[in-house]
Amino acid sequence: MAPAVHTPAGAVRYAVSGPPASGRPDLVLVHGWCCESSSMATLKQAFAGDHRILEIDLRGHGESSRVEDDGSMGVGGIRMADMGEPVPRALRDVRIEDYADDVWQVCRKALAQTPVLVGHSMGALVVLAALAAHHTGPQAPIGGVLLDPAPVVDPSGKAFWQEAAVEVAGDHSGTWRTRFAEGLFLSTDRVARHAVIETMARFRPAVAAGAARAVADFDGETALRRVETPLLVIHADTAERQIGEVARDAGVALTEGQTVGAGHFHHLEVPEQVVPMIARWLQVRDLDAHMDVAGPHG
C-alpha cells in the first residue's frame, strides 16, 4: 500500500514522485470534494520532471477510504463502503482545518522541501487553511495555488453547501451528486468528464455530506486574511470576486487569473492554460527562480 499518516479518520495515503533533489519547491497536490488524487494527474505530468510531487488522498477519499487487510481480499484492500462499516465521527464531523492538518502531517512525514500547495475546489480551501496555520520549518509551505476554489467568502455559496450537505446525506443512489457533477462541466468539456462524474457519485453519502458541511462552515475570509505567503487563484468559468477584494484589503500577495473555455475541472480540460500560469507565477514570485519562463519542459 501507499505510505500514509494516521489520523482519527484512519490512514491518509499519499504518493511521492519526481526528482528527489531538484532545487525547486515540492508541489503538493490537493484534490476537491468527492474526488481523488488522480483528478490532479495533468499537473503531476506537467511538473514531475522538474519538481518533487506529493499527491494526497484526503481522509475518506481515494486510497484513504480503503482499509488494511491481510492480502486475502485483493490487491489494495477494499472500500469501507463495500463493507458496510460505520463512518467514523472524524469523517462525519470533519472540518477543513482537519484536512489541512493531514496535509501538514504528510508534508512533515514526506520531508517536503519548501512546498507550494496546489488545491482544486474544496482542496483550495484546504490550502488556505494550511497557509493560515503559519507552520514553520523546512516543511512549511511557501505559497499556495487555488484552482477554481469552492466558496471562500461568498455567503450564497456557503448557503448552497449547507443545503447540499442535507441532500447528499440521503443521496444513497448517487443521483444528486451525478446531477451536481454534470453541472460542473461546460458542454464543450471532454477530458475525464465521465470518470469524474462516476467518482463523485460513488462516494459514501455520509463522507460526502461531512465534507460538504466542512465547506459550508469554513471561515474562508478569516483564513484568507491570515495568509502571509504568495497566493495564486485561477478561476474557471465563474469567479468569486470577493476573494480579490478581501485579499487586497488584507495586504495578501494575491495574483488572479482565469481560464477560457473550460468548466470547473479546467486543470484537466485546458492544462495548456493552467500550467504556464502556475509556472510563471512561481518564477515572478521568486518561488522557483531557476524555472524557464515557458514552464516545465517548455
Image (cartoon, helix red, strand yellow):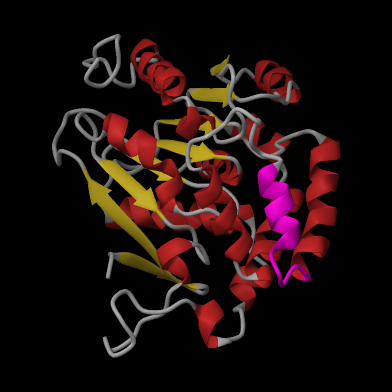
Please identify the quadrant where the N terminus is shown.
bottom left
Answer above or below: position of 69 versus 254. below
Whether residue 274 can be seen here: yes
Tell me the quarter of the picture where residue 19 sits: top left
Task: Please provide the residue range marked out in magenta.
Answer: 170-182
Taking depth in this image into account, of 257 and 81 the one nearest to the observer is: 81
Q: How many marks?
A: 0
Tell me the quarter of the picture where residue 128 sits: top right
Taking depth in this image into account, of 239 and 117 the one nearest to the observer is: 239
User: Is 116 in the magenta?
Assistant: no
Q: What residue sits 21% from the left and 20% below the top?
A: 297
Please identify the quadrant where the C terminus is shown.
top left
- Horizontal side, residue 17 vs residue 62: left or right: left
| Coordinates of residue 49 in the picture (x, y in percent) | 19, 31
- Horizontal side, residue 152 vs residue 257: left or right: right
Answer above or below: position of 270 versus 159. above
Tell me the quarter of the picture where residue 206 sits: bottom right
| Coordinates of residue 164 in the picture (x, y in percent) | 80, 55
Whether residue 111 can be seen here: no
User: Is 178 in the magenta?
Assistant: yes
| Coordinates of residue 160 in the picture (x, y in percent) | 83, 46
Answer above or below: position of 108 versus 71. above
Q: What residue sits 39% from the left and 31% below the top?
A: 142
Answer above or below: position of 43 versus 168. above
Q: What residue sits 62% from the left and 35% below the top?
A: 149
| Coordinates of residue 150 in the picture (x, y in percent) | 66, 40
Taking depth in this image into account, of 31 and 74 the one nearest to the observer is: 74
- Horizontal side, residue 177 vs residue 261: left or right: right
* Magenta: main secondary structure: helix
